[in-house]
Amino acid sequence: MSGFVNKAMGNMEAGVGKIIGDEEMRKRGEDRAHQGHGQQLRQEDEAKRQANIDDAKNSSMAQKTKGAAEQAGGTLKQGAGRAMGNPGMEQAGRQTRDQGIGRVDKNTD
């Protein structure tokens, strides 16, 4: 269950306990609400951490590195295709190389 739900359920349980005069229920609800709040904070921290990872993956430097790798791999594939007399492989290598060049150029400041 999400932290938000646990927090809300705990607050409801604490409220009902208070209304009906059941101290044990009120205390149990407060404990659940506190646990839910902590869980909610951890979930928010995890979401922020994941967003930072996603930002890093999409950063300009990461894209330039990926482009350079595509460019190198494409060049190798193009050369292998040429050496083996395989025009399809040569063309695929050229396309990958060009894609890498474009990625590097697009992310150059």
Image (cartoon, grey):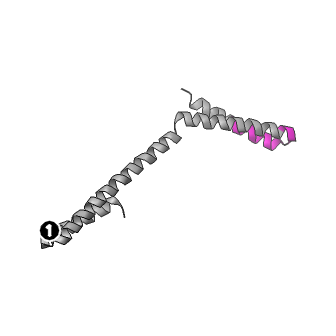
Label 1 belongs to which residue?
18
SS class, disc 1: helix
Quarter of the image with the N terminus is: bottom left
| The quadrant where residue 27 appears | bottom left
Image spot of residue 104 (x, y percent): 61, 32
Point 34% across, 57% down: residue: 39
Image spot of residue 40 (x, y percent): 33, 55
Point 67% across, 38% down: residue: 70
Q: Nearer the viewer, residue 91 or 45?
A: 45
| The quadrant where residue 5 appears | bottom left
Residue 3 placement, left or right of 18: right
Query: What secondary structure do most residues of the magenta stretch adopt?
Result: helix
| The quadrant where residue 92 appears | top right
Point 72% across, 38% down: residue: 74
Image spot of residue 83 (x, y percent): 86, 38
Extreme residue in the top direction: 109
Q: Nearer the viewer, residue 88 or 13?
A: 13
* Number of numbered discs: 1
Residue 88 placement, left or right of 53: right
Residue 22 lies within the magenta run = no
Disc 1 crowd, CA 10 A, few/some/many (<14, 14-19, 20+): some
Residue 37 placement, left or right of 83: left
Q: Which residues are magenta?
A: 82-97
The residue type indicated by label 1 comes to Lys
Residue 95 lies within the magenta run = yes
